Amino acid sequence: SGLVSPAGAAAMAVGGLAKVFVDAAKAAADFEDHLADLQALTGLDAEGMKKLGDGALDMSGRFQSSAGEIVDAMKLIGSQAPELLKVPDALMEVTDAANVLSEAARIEVTDAAKAITGTMNQMGASSSEAADIINTFAAASQQGSADVAYLNTVFEKAGTNAAGAKMNFLELAAATETIAPKFSSADVAGTNLNGLLLKLSVQANDKFKPAV
């Protein structure tokens, strides 16, 4: 017959429970491996690593990424913005923002992390501005012509000169959205915008240069 005996059902239940424990043990060991790699990168003590580990576990409950994937995002963010490696709270703040942007814009968390840290590096922004950065990227990609990848490429090309011109990332995003319909290539758009900013900078310097 196709019926399962009570003993058979009990054996199946025990087997299923055992698999759950094995999977949980593997996940825990994998998480510890990820943390060990992160510690090697940060050089933080046990207290600092506990804070990062607890933060990763908390984020894994709020986002779709696993705790191990979140630790990997921390490693990427730290490699892109080394000043964050010694400040657990700042590193977690940017990692949290990367996960928010990832889910809002439906992109990989690694791409979101690169966009945020790239903007921070190019525009001289701090970790406390991460939330404003992701809001700018999310709003621009949802309402404008340029998605996160497009914006990130333009920021890489033109961010330094934009910062030199006292533009903030919100203004640079708005400028990018203005020219995006004219350039299908973000590389070309960024190069053109950078050239314009450089030209304006040179003109401003010439205007205020004392006569010899």
Image (spheres, rainbow, N blue to C red):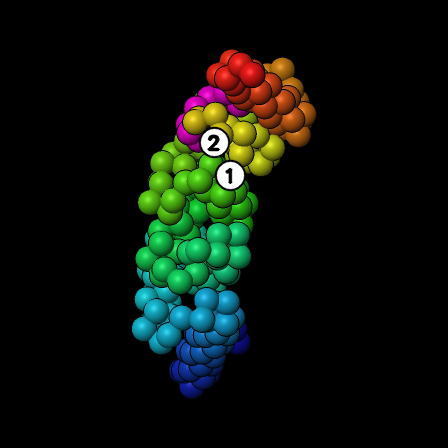
Position of 163 relative to 31 (above/below): above
Please report the bounds of the magenta region as a residue range: 168-178
Point out residue 168 in the picture as x, y percentages from the top left corner.
42, 29
Graded by Cα atoms within 10 Å as few (under 14), some (14 to 19) or many (20 or more), the crowding at tag 1 reads some
Element type where label 2 sits in the image: helix
Q: Does the image show residue 178?
A: no
Point out residue 30 in the picture as x, y percentages from the top left corner.
50, 73
- Could you tell me what secondary structure mostly forms the magenta stretch? helix
When asked about the image quadrant of residue 24, the answer is bottom left
C-beta proximity under 8 Å, tags 2 and 1: yes
Q: CA distance from mark 2 to mark 1?
A: 7 Å
Tell me, yes or no, whether the highlighted magenta stretch contains residue 162: no
Q: Residue furthest front?
A: 212
Which residue corresponds to mark 1?
Answer: 122
Which residue corresponds to mark 2?
Answer: 163
- Amino acid on which disc 2 is placed: Ala
Point out residue 186 in the picture as x, y percentages from the top left corner.
63, 28
